[in-house]
Amino acid sequence: MKKIDIKEVQDNVIAIASEELIPRFAKVKREHKADGSFLTEADLIMQQRIADVLIKLWPGTVFLGEEMNHDEQAALLSSAKPVWCLDPLDGTSNFAAGIPYFSVSLALIESEKVTQALVYDPIRKECFTANEKNGARLNGELLKLSDAGVNLSQATGLIDFKRLDVELATRLVTERPYASQRSFGSVALDWCWLAAGRCHLYLHGSSHIWDYAAGNYIFNLAGGFSSTLSGEPIFINKLEPRSSVAAVDKGLFKDWSDWLGKL
């Protein structure tokens, strides 16, 4: 198999997103999947086109997409081959409603670890990429987090309330530990905005591997700190949903984790 070039991956994803997502933005009908989430024709077309390109360019790899069934996904994760893990449209409800916050998320998993990652925001034309050799980058520019210079009470958090335990969600509202809170609607892009230092904290109760694999890898290589609510590494090579806690520097991560642990 020829060497995987993240620039070649990037060029293809950007081209497909430009052709398939932008013309459909806010103009497509949406359907409900069995889990209650949304699905549009853009999700399916993006998944098929990206899968076709990746397998053609790197025939030694296999492809796992969000819009595949559970048994197919589980079998692919257990494959000995490198696995492309794709969310073709992360933030489908935003996309269908005309809210300009959605992304394409793609991770390469080799030997049960993420080795390459890409998240593309076609509205802002921002492409986040990462691998061990080149670090985390935004449109080619290195992303490197440093001390944010704020304490917990001054921080801005990206918080997804709907997937949190009721007790924790209530406590966040009544005891608010941070200065301000946001919830935008694309897990992959949330991770990248954290990697770019646009917010300080993150909390999500349950996201899937195609949601977090690329974004969390980019954030970690940018120098961020993250774990599950129980203190474990977020990425595991399994389909089970994972919680996420993160902060842009070590001090904030400790204070944020300590506050969340006091239930």
Image (tube, rainbow, N blue to C red):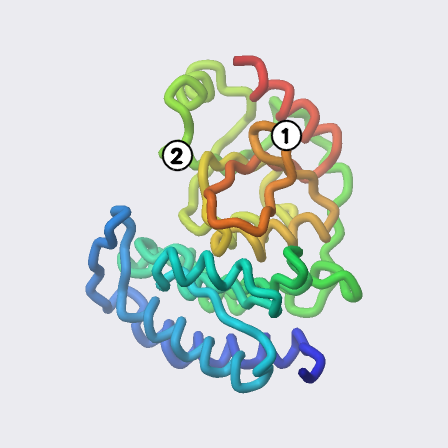
* Local secondary structure at mark 1: loop
From the top left corner, tell me how far across and down residue 29 is, in percent. Answer: 20, 64
**Looking at the image, residue 144 lies above or below residue 7:** above
Q: Is any atom of residue 53 visible in this view?
A: yes
From the top left corner, tell me how far across and down residue 256 is, in percent. Answer: 62, 25
* Residue nearer the viewer, 137 or 245: 245
Please give the name of the residue rendered at 27% of the width and 64% of the height, measured from the top-left corner: 40
- Closer to viewer: mark 2 or mark 1: 1
**Looking at the image, residue 19 lies above or below residue 139:** below
Q: Is any atom of residue 196 visible in this view?
A: no
Is disc 1 surrounded by few (<14), some (14 to 19) or many (20+) residues within 10 Å?
A: few
Question: In the figure, is residue 56 to the left or right of 174?
Answer: right
Question: In the figure, is residue 244 to the left or right of 37?
Answer: right
- Quadrant in the picture for residue 139: bottom right
Give the residue pinned by disc 1: 231
Q: Earlier in the sequence, mark 2 or mark 1?
A: 2
* Local secondary structure at mark 2: helix
Q: Amino acid at mark 2?
A: Arg
Q: Amino acid at mark 1?
A: Gly
- Res 83 label: none
Label 1 near label 2: C-beta < 8 Å?
Answer: no
- Res 163 label: 2
Please give the name of the residue rendered at 33% of the width and 70% of the height, measured from the top-left corner: 44
From the top left corner, tell me how far across and down residue 255 is, in percent. Answer: 67, 23
**Looking at the image, residue 130 lies above or below residue 178:** below
Question: In the figure, is residue 176 to the left or right of 49?
Answer: right
